[in-house]
Amino acid sequence: MQGFEEQAEAFAERIAAEIEERRLNFPVSMEVSLRIKRLADDPDSTLDRIATVVQAEPVLSAKTVRMANTVALNPYRARVETVRDAVHRIGLSALRSLALAVATEQLAGDHRSPNMRMLAHGLWLRSVDVASWCFALARQTRAANPDAALLAGMMTHIGQFFLLARASDYPAMEASIDRFAALVDDMHQSVGLAVLEVFDMPESILDCLEVEHTYDGEWPPADLGHVVQLASLVSEAPNPFDGLLGRNPVRGPAAAAVFGIDTDELAALLAASHEERGEILAAVRG
């Protein structure tokens, strides 16, 4: 069996070649997300046809109905009981976000190594928490479309997720998870951008997830990039890669204080957003 160095080199070369050829091999669990995306982009598709695809995935079906019955998306409490009605209720943007959340949740459990499973699960918890905050903060500030913010939030760690999923073919890296974390830290930005391009993300989402796009503390948040970065700051769910890399970033409201944001104004915004964030988080987590 090859050692870590040999497998890490082979892994990096394989991913780099796929990016160069603009051909990423997605894990099976992400194929439903890609299929929904392709149908959503097809002008001849209908919501009923997309609902048929969703119904073929039991977990996604259940979570779609659950999301459709949240107060945030169903304020008049007209009970939704079928997948078809649920798809019509939440719309394509939210459905794409939910499909991605389900796919990455499945990836989190699809590892031989217990340590790798824990790492993937922690990253999933972080992603859905950031996405839920994105939705709620966008609703409260009106700085961005909430559904677009939800999708952008789910994409914040997509490069790390993709590399985690592909690492299962390289057992030596699973056995040296701290060294694997350093490798992912070097690669995830370029890989994440490649994944976003394959998913044909709108320019607004691509721009706000660029590493150069930094939040300067403008208040109130004025655009999608501000919303995503503020959500990343206030989320108290840790990114497990930080721990493996010896990082201990400040999380939660205290993190936003470094930008000079008025703590009372931030607290008021978070309090107003808390209920919607909780509803979306519960619907996604199931």
Image: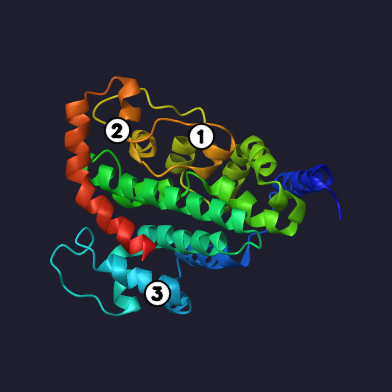
Residue beneath the point at 22% across and 40% down: 270
Q: Position of residue 13 (x, y in %)?
A: 79, 45
Judging by the rendered image, the residue that carries numbered circle 2 is 253
Q: Position of residue 171 (x, y in %)?
A: 75, 56
Q: Is residue 24 visible?
A: no
Q: Position of residue 213 (x, y in %)?
A: 46, 29
Q: Within 10 Å of the Cα at label 2, are there few (<14), some (14-19), or many (20+) other Cα atoms? A: some
SS for callout 2? helix
Q: Position of residue 278 (x, y in %)?
A: 26, 54
SS for callout 3? helix
Between discs 3 and 1, the one toward the N terminus: 3
Q: Nearer the viewer, mark 3 or mark 1?
A: 3
Q: CA distance from mark 2 to mark 3?
A: 34 Å
Q: Quadrant of residue 283?
A: bottom left
Q: Judge from the rendering whether residue 169 lies leftward or rightward of residue 264; answer left or right.
A: right
Specify the farthest residue to the right.
1
Q: Judge from the rendering whether residue 26 lies leftward or rightward of residue 126; answer left or right.
A: right
Q: Quadrant of residue 85?
A: bottom left
SS for callout 1? loop
Contact between marks 3 and 1 (CB within 8 A): the answer is: no
Judging by the rendered image, the residue that carries numbered circle 3 is 61
Residue beneath the point at 22% across and 26% down: 263
Q: Within 10 Å of the Cα at label 3, are there few (<14), some (14-19), or many (20+) other Cα atoms? A: many
Between discs 2 and 1, the one toward the N terminus: 1
Q: Amino acid at mark 2?
A: Pro
Q: CA distance from mark 2 to mark 1?
A: 23 Å
Q: Amino acid at mark 3?
A: Ser
Q: Nearer the viewer, mark 2 or mark 3?
A: 2
Q: Amino acid at mark 1?
A: Glu
Q: Nearer the viewer, mark 2 or mark 1?
A: 2
Task: Give the number of the disc on residue 210.
Answer: 1
